[in-house]
Image: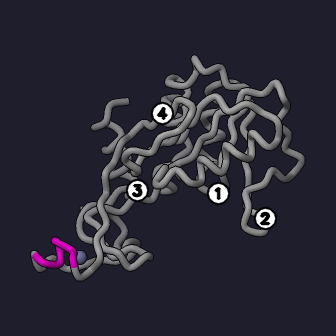
Amino acid sequence: MTRDALLDLFRKSGALLEGHFRLTSGLHSPGYLQCALVLQHPDTAERLGAAIAERVRQLRPSVVLSPALGGIVIGQEVGRALGVRAIFAERQDGALTLRRGFMIAETDRVLVVEDVLTTGGSTRETMQVATAAGGRVVGAASIVNRGSGVKFDVPYVALLEMNLPTYEPERCPLCAQGMSVVKPGSRPVAT
Ligand SMILES: [Zn+2]
């Protein structure tokens, strides 16, 4: 999948809005990304999973581990394309944990998959879950990489690099241009 094809998928599903947004954090941004909106279409989710799988297959993962909730759908699809198990870690008392009887064996080669990587913090925490369970982390992947310069000790693959800056409202160049600001979700489709 080319960058243009991916961006097109995001725009068409409303997962990527471009304009002038007030985010939940209060910061302003020229873009808003909501991966769940692209993943709500199972055929698209499957294609994205296959595209990631193609790029990580040589790492020979034996299990895909994702952080809940954002990573679950894409993790499942990567696992499907690779023909391996797809499991997830979820928060319990603030810490990511394997629950529901999910197991990682010492022989397992773990691929950590999430939807959007921003700081890399949740991918890193998911890697620690895998290591603590006795597995070996062989790589990480996400659909979108918003975090420029994030580095891991293992190979990391993203389908789409996307730089969406955020600004303090009083320093926002879009406000300075007099553009009206929109709260994401307050209109159904991108312009
Ligand atoms: Zn602004």
Q: Quadrant of residue 178?
A: bottom left
| Image position, residue 154 (x, y; %) | 57, 31
Local crowd size for mark 1, using a 10 Å CA cut-off: few (<14), some (14–19), many (≥20):
some
In the rendering, which numbered label is found on residue 15? Answer: 3
Q: Amino acid at mark 1?
A: Leu
Q: Amino acid at mark 2?
A: Gln
Location of mark 1 (residue): 69
Whether the residues at callouts 1 and 4 have beta carbons within 8 Å, the answer is no
| Image position, residue 70 (x, y; %) | 59, 55
Q: Amino acid at mark 3?
A: Ala
Q: Earlier in the sequence, mark 2 or mark 1?
A: 1
Location of mark 2 (residue): 92
Q: Secondary structure at mark 2?
A: strand
Specify start and end residues of the magenta stretch as a single range.
171-176
| Image position, residue 158 (x, y; %) | 45, 37
The N terminus - image quarter: top left
